[in-house]
Each structure stands twice: as C-alpha cells, then as structure tokens.
Amino acid sequence: MGIIVFKYIQNSSERIDGTPVLLRHSFVWNQKVWSKLSTHNKLNLIKTKKSLKGLDPRVNGDIGLSEFQESADIKNYSIEVISGSTKLNLPVSSFKSTPKIGYTSEFRCIEGWSEDTQYAGTRFSDFMAFYDLGKKSDGTYYQYVGLETPDKKYYVSIDIESMLHPQTILAYEMNEEPISDDNGAPLRLIIPIKYGIKSLKRIGRIVFSDTRPPDYWAERGYDWYSGF
Amino acid sequence: MGEKKIVISEKFTRVLRWSHWINFFMLTLMIWSGILIYWANDQYIKIPNELASALSIRGRLAEGMGWHFFIMWFFVGNGIFYFSYLLLSSEWRSLAIDRKTWPEAISVISHDLKISKVKPIQKGKFNAAQKIAYVSAILMGAGAVLSGLAIYKPVSLGFLTSMLGGYKAARFEHFLMMIGFVLFFIVHIIQVARAGWNNFRAMAVGYEIEKD
C-alpha cells in the first residue's frame, strides 16, 4: 500500500517547477513552520579573530558570469535598481557610500559543503534606506527582492524579511581582498541565513516587487525559500 | 480421535505492529532520499560513478530534498507516537536494560555465533542482546532527528548545531546514524530469518502459536 502511494507521488504528472506537486506544497508548508522560529534576528556568525586573508573562497559555479570577460569592464558598469517608479543606474563605487560592514560566517552550499569566509560590503538595509528603496507609497515594504546577473542567465528572488536581515550585504570584499572575478566581482549578494544558491554573484539588476520574481534553482526543483 | 489443541498468545500489540511497519517504510524513504542528498557532496564514502549511475542516485539532490523534508514529518510523528506508547503502556518493561543485561547479551551473542554452547535463559519477550539492539535503534532515531535538525536549520536552531560540534560535525553525525540504521537492519533481518515464520507472523498479525 505504501509502495503504491510512493509511486503515485513519484510519477504524478502534476509538477510545479519540476517537483511533484505534493512535495512542492511540503516545501511551502516547511517554510511556514520554520519561519516562525524567526531566523530574522539570529545570526550566522563565526566568532573567530583569525584572519582569512589570502584564502581563496571555493568557486562552485559560473552560471551568469558570461558577460564582462575583461576586468576593466567589470569596474565600469552600473547596476540597475528598480523600486516602484524609482529607477536608478548606480556605478559600483556608489555602493561604498554607506558604512562598510564585515563579518565571518559559514557559507553553506546546498550540496552539503561549507566554508568559513569573511565578507565586507554594504548592509542591504542601509543601502535601501540610503536611496529610499523598497517601500511602497503606503509605507510598507515590497514583499520580494529579485536580483539578476548582467547576462540575465542567473537570477534569484528572496523574501523581504531575509533581505532586511542585518547580515544580508552587498559584498565587494571576501577574505579581506576585493572579490575575484569568478567569485562574483565587482559586487555580489551575501545572505548567510540561506543556502549559497541565493547569494547571487555579479549583480546586474535589483528589483523590488510584490509578485515573486523568477528564481533559477526554484525553477529546477529546489525549495524556493532555502532558509536556515 | 484426539483433538489438536492450538494455543496462541498475543506477542506484539496492534500499536507496536503498526508503528513498526510505518517506521520501516518511512525510514527506508528517509535513507533513500538522504542518499540522494548525500551524493551531491559524497565526502565520507565514495563509490564509483558508474555504480552510482547504475543505482540512479546521481544528480537528484532537489528530488532528494523534496522527499526528505516531506517524509521527515511522518517519520518523527510515528517515532513520537511509538515512544509515548512505550512509556504510557507497560511495554517499555520488555526493553528495560539493567546492569545484568550487558553480560547476558555477551552470552547471547556468543551462543548465536556458535562460540558457546550454553543456551542463555530468556525472561520476557526479548533476550538481552535484543534489548540493547532495540534501545540503540530508538536512541539512533533520536540522534538522527537531532543531527538532522542541526543541519536543516543551523541558524534558527544554531544552539543545537553548536552542541553537536558545528555544522560539518553534525552532517557527519547524521551520516553515522544512517550507517547505524543500515547495520541494525542487516543484523535484524538475519535474526528475524533465524527466529522463523512463527515470530515473523507475530509481527504481522500480532499472535504467536505457542504449541500445536
């Protein structure tokens, strides 16, 4: 009897983004349950004073990094930001207008490996406040933030609560050095309360929205929330 | 014409039988989906890629996670139900371990391995080695759930992750629990086969024929 139920779920033609519909509902149910534990005020922090300078963070994928093969181009492009009627084209240097935040945390890949890494950059909530982004005319936040690479081949969407987490940063330094090209130069997202698939490299565009923007790995059968 | 008398007695209650078989099915699914997840980063035990392809366990991380985080609710629910039943009924008594259980277990094992010819005396439903094996299985269940939670929610349940020695350690501990279950399963199957049909039938329908 159990085997019949298993086969039925496994072979059900009804799928949402590659996942049997029941298991997709289970992802959403888990998100509802676990987000009650309020990850949003807990930190993923490694309490070490040890410098990680000179250590190369593991490079695990290059999807979305096809544009800008020359390092010079990477320094000279601007990032598009859309929040309601506000449309900005910000040069990479403008992300240094807000205070630099740095910390060491454990970067956890959905594949199962993890690595301690030091990050520095601007806190996403500071960036939002500085340019007055993310709020609708009634003063409430948009529910989602969508990010994509300049070549539009990699894209993620994240709930606003997680984006407002104090450790969510737009990073320009890793292990005390400017981010290397294949780790996402010049500016990448680091969101250590979620699996690494959400920490998009080489940001090309940031969009605030109430409809959930597309998410590369969620379209390929993974849990959209992917939060710790 | 002498009539044949059959005496049957209840060995396993309905609750025990249901929770046992539900657990068997859920645990099988947990181990299978866990292997799909493990395979994305096979750092403890490696098998040749050809074999992994033949077993069709490669490149199925998303699917494995979908199943693992769905079945976990039923696995944990059934585990809690079983454990509460043990405590509330008197069934826990047949699993109770005391100081004498350990030396008795050694004599059971040496008899089963044909090292010793002395047949150990068994009081109650289970012999000493069984008691230890079943209690270990319950503890491994608890260990699998705790180490699993520690790697599933290492920020929300960060205290648990630190208690287990960190994220990497907890992942390894979770893997060890799986290995423990597999070893338990192998021994369990061998012993069930040795114990024979009468005993197996008792786990299926509850009753054992004492004499006929």
Image (tube, rainbow, N blue to C red):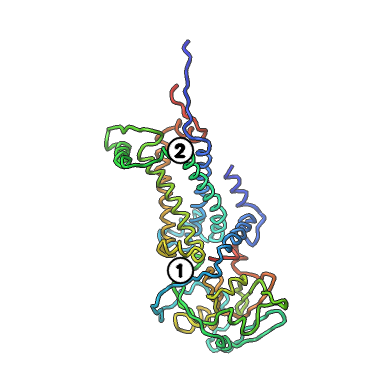
Give the residue pinned by disc 2.
Answer: B91
- Could you tell me residue A64's position as x and y percent? 58, 76
Q: Of residues B166 and A10, which is closer to you in this image?
A: B166
- Could you tell me residue A227's position as x and y percent? 55, 66
B201 is higher (above) or lower (below) than B186: above
Quarter that holds the N terminus of chain A: top right
Tell me how many marks there are. Answer: 2
Query: Which image quadrant for residue B125?
Result: top left
Give the residue pinned by disc 1.
Answer: A114
The answer to whether residue B187 is visible is yes
A72 is higher (above) or lower (below) than B41: below
Q: Residues within 10 Å of mark 2 (few under 14, many from 20)?
A: some
- Dot 2 falls on which chain? B
- Which of the two discs, 1 and 2, sits closer to the camera? 2
The answer to whether residue A157 is visible is no
Please give the name of the residue rendered at 55% of the width and 63% of the height, measured from the top-left corner.
Answer: A37
- Dot 1 falls on which chain? A
Q: Of residues A166 and A110, which is closer to you in this image?
A: A166
CA gap, disc 1 to disc 2?
43 Å
Q: Which mark is residue B177?
A: none
Q: Secondary structure at mark 2?
A: helix
Please give the name of the residue rendered at 47% of the width and 61% of the height, measured from the top-left corner.
Answer: B150
Q: Is residue B200 left or right of residue A64?
A: left
Farthest top residue? B1
Residue type pointed to by label 2: Glu
Q: Residues within 10 Å of mark 1 (few under 14, many from 20)?
A: some
- Could you tell me residue A101's position as x and y percent? 51, 81
Query: Which image quadrant for residue A33?
Result: bottom right
Q: Of residues A192 and B65, which is closer to you in this image?
A: A192
Residue type pointed to by label 1: Ser
Please give the name of the residue rendered at 48% of the width and 38% of the height, measured from the top-left corner.
Answer: B89
Query: Which image quadrant for residue A55?
Result: bottom left
